[in-house]
């Protein structure tokens, strides 16, 4: 069967520019530490051989990957463009300015801060920008001073107490929210007094009346929207109305769905940028850039956001900002909109294929890039399902479902996402095959016996021959859609 066109296909042969570039880079590394060169090569081989359904992962283009491996890594550049604490940053300024310009243009945002090293870091920058704007600036004004070093000991102590007394409202973890939205194991939960809004117990959908009720009662400083495992769109216009009603700053963490915003699949009420005071994101998930984060905001918060480094961030990573600029330039091309559309179509088709085979999906389906399968319908925990699928070469991650009786470790769900497979060139025709592979493994898997003879939540048994047969079908499917077809490491 003919192989389909991957996002990074090239027609030149036999040795492409990409092959020469990666081979040369590995040759140089090999001369110093051959084991690392080997591990890099093995990672590519592993990625080529696995059916990646991790909703938060993707494959960055060769241009993005290559933009990261250079001497920008050697530069310190604390501060912001034109206001560095180090000399000699003119080329870093160029890179950071271009990345920020692409981000502003792509998302229609007044300001973009491209330094955060990850999504968690971007959220920390945003939290402290809001705290500075709404707690520190008024305190300085009241005390009649310009900066915190000028405060009396008593005023400084009062300000520090005020920082620790602020409230945040975000989506509950088991409804699909993220740990950084105020949960105790994360620094955000130690900084803020937090409350959560959940989803409707029957439909699994976000209940805006309930968000409004909790917001009115709790009156948060920050209302957070955004998720890691909620398979539906969020109406940001309604969320902003709620924030305005209770005087909250409205923050959206679009880490998961930034690619769908960039690709104009989420528009109108579902585009967070016109509605949020501040937006954070990762750059490596559906946006398909390097590992990293970003913050977008209006002019009101820009100055505080730009203090991210050294406020909460370590020195910027200029080589990663260079790769962010390349990825954002790619996302501004018209074909990225086609990619984003295909991601969502693929998720919908995968959901239909699973539902037709009898699987249970949280909320009954999806309208974004991810779906959450409740594997208790197969008599399994998420951990058993994840491990059995991995045996057959299918990479997923276990995930709690709302009000999960198995908790966050074993869970009752697996989360599936289509950004990576879509980059690889799989389309709706292949999604039914993927649904079948998942269903075949899950329906052939049973809980194993625990060490005490009872039913284990971790051990599992798969009917004889199923893993081998599915692994063969996975290899056949992936063989028709080669990953990084322009890269031959020799
Ligand atoms: N925010 C959300 C909604 C996420 O899903 C994630 C990661 O999964 C993050 C933030 C954290 O991103 P990172 O791992 O880059 O810090």
Image (cartoon, helix red, strand yellow):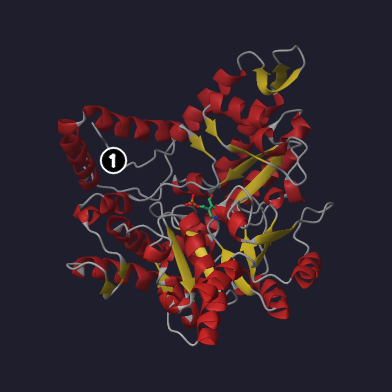
Residue 241 occupies which quadrant of the picture?
bottom right
Could you tell me if residue 273 is visible in this image? no
The answer to whether 401 is drawn above or below residue 223 in the figure is: above
Residue 42 occupies which quadrant of the picture?
top left
Q: In percent of the image, x 61 and y 53: which residue is there?
A: 178
Closest to the observer, 33 or 62: 33
Could you tell me if residue 140 is visible in this image? yes
How far across and how far down the image is residue 68, in percent? 28, 52
How far across and how far down the image is residue 248, in percent? 66, 75
Image quadrant in which the N terminus is located: top left
Residue bearing the label numbered 1:
487
The answer to whether 287 is drawn above or below residue 441 in the figure is: below
Closest to the observer, 189 or 434: 189
Label 1, ligand 1: CB separation under 8 Å:
no
Q: Residue furthest right?
A: 202
**Image side of residue 254 versus residue 405, left or right:** left
The answer to whether 362 is drawn above or below residue 235 in the figure is: above
The answer to whether 453 is drawn above or below residue 376 in the figure is: above
What is the count of numbered marks?
Answer: 1
Closest to the observer, 309 or 281: 309
Image quadrant in which the C terminus is located: top left
Closest to the observer, 303 or 98: 303
Residue 98 occupies which quadrant of the picture?
bottom left
How far across and how far down the image is residue 439, in percent? 67, 32
Q: In percent of the image, x 22 and y 57: which residue is there?
A: 72
For label 1, the SS is loop
**Image side of residue 36 versus residue 380, left or right:** left
Q: In percent of the image, x 41 and y 46: which residue is there?
A: 59
How far across and how far down the image is residue 330, in percent? 37, 61
How packed mark 1 is, by other alpha carbons closer than 10 Å (few <14, some 14-19, many 20 or more), is: many
């Amino acid at each position: 069967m003919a192989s389909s066109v991957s996002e990074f296909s090239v027609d030149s042969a036999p040795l492409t520019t990409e092959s020469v570039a990666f081979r040369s880079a590995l040759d140089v590394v090999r001369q110093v530490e051959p084991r690392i060169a080997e591990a890099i090569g093995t990672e590519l081989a592993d990625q080529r051989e696995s059916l990646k359904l991790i909703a938060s992962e993707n494959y960055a283009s060769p241009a993005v990957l290559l933009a990261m491996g250079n001497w920008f890594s050697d530069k310190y550049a604390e501060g912001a463009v034109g206001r560095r604490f180090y000399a000699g940053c003119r080329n870093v300024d160029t890179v950071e300015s271009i990345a920020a310009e692409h981000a502003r243009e792509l998302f229609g945002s007044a300001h973009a801060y491209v330094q955060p090293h990850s999504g968690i870091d971007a959220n920390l920058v945003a939290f402290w920008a809001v705290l500075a704007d709404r707690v520190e600036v008024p305190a300085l004004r009241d005390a009649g001073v310009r900066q915190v070093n000028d405060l009396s000991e008593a005023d400084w102590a009062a300000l520090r107490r005020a920082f620790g007394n602020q409230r945040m409202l975000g989506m509950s973890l088991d409804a699909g929210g993220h740990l950084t939205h105020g949960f105790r194991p994360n620094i955000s939960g130690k900084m803020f007094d937090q409350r959560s809004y959940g989803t409707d117990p029957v439909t699994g959908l976000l209940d805006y009346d309930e968000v409004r009720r909790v917001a009115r009662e709790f009156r948060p400083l920050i209302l957070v929207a955004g998720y890691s495992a909620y398979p539906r769109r969020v109406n940001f216009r309604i969320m902003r109305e709620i924030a305005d009603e209770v005087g909250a700053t409205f923050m959206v963490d679009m880490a998961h769905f930034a690619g769908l915003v960039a690709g104009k699949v989420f528009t109108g009420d579902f585009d967070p940028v016109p509605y949020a005071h501040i937006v954070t994101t990762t750059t490596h998930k559906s946006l398909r850039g390097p590992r990293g984060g970003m913050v977008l905001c209006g002019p009101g918060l820009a100055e505080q956001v730009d203090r991210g480094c050294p406020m909460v961030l370590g020195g910027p990573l200029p080589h990663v900002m260079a790769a962010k600029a390349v990825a954002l330039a790619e996302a501004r091309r018209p074909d990225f909109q086609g990619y984003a559309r295909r991601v969502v179509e693929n998720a919908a088709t995968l959901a239909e294929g699973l539902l037709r085979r009898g699987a249970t999906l949280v909320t009954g389906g999806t309208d974004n890039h991810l779906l959450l399968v409740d594997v208790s319908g197969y008599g399994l925990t998420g951990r058993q399902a994840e491990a059995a699928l991995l045996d057959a070469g299918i990479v997923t991650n276990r995930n709690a479902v709302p009000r999960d009786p198995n908790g966050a470790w074993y869970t009752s769900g697996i989360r599936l996402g289509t950004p990576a497979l879509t980059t690889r060139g799989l389309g709706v025709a292949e999604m039914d095959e993927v649904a079948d592979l998942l269903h075949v493994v899950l329906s052939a898997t049973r809980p194993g016996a625990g060490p005490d003879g009872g039913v284990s939540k971790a051990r599992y048994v798969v009917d004889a021959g199923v893993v081998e047969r599915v692994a063969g079908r996975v290899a056949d499917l992936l063989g028709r859609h080669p990953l990084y077809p322009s890269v031959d490491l020799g």
